[in-house]
Amino acid sequence: MRLLLVAVAAAAAYYLYRQRAQMRPSGSTTNASDAVDDIELRPNASADEHLDAAVMETFPASDPVSPGKISDTAWERQQRLQDSQR
């Protein structure tokens, strides 16, 4: 009888373990495009702010920083494209 109770308890524990494993996200929980899209730069930003934006655009740090070229953020590019289509 005790062996049966131990087997039932082990089966229940395994079932709960598997259910929890399915609820956990697999892989990376970060989205690189979200990190790039969140970059906001005011129109009269200083050189330090442009440098900070350039560092943020290199996420996940696979590209070198190029603060010499002031570029649009993803949101600014999207707005410019929408304005040009109107």
Image (spheres, helix red, strand yellow):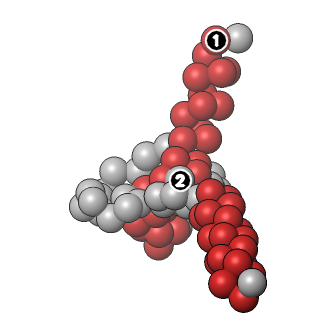
Callout 1 amino acid = Gln
Q: Which residue corresponds to the image point at 64% horizontal and 12% vertical from the top-left? A: 85
Q: Residue furthest top?
A: 86
- Between discs 1 and 2, the one toward the N terminus: 2
Place of residue 35 in the rendered image (x, y in percent of width and height, measured from the top left): 55, 57
Quarter of the rendering containing residue 55: bottom left
Residue 46 numbered tag: none
Q: CA distance from mark 1 to mark 2?
A: 28 Å
Above or below, 46 against 36 in this view is: below
Above or below, 70 against 30 in this view is: above
Crowding at label 1, few (<14), some or many (≥20) Cα neighbours within 10 Å? Answer: few
For label 1, the residue is 85
| Residue 31 seen anywhere in this rendered image of the structure | yes
Q: Residue furthest front?
A: 1
Place of residue 29 in the rendered image (x, y in percent of width and height, measured from the top left): 55, 60
Q: Which residue corresponds to the image point at 55% horizontal and 34% vertical from the top-left? A: 77
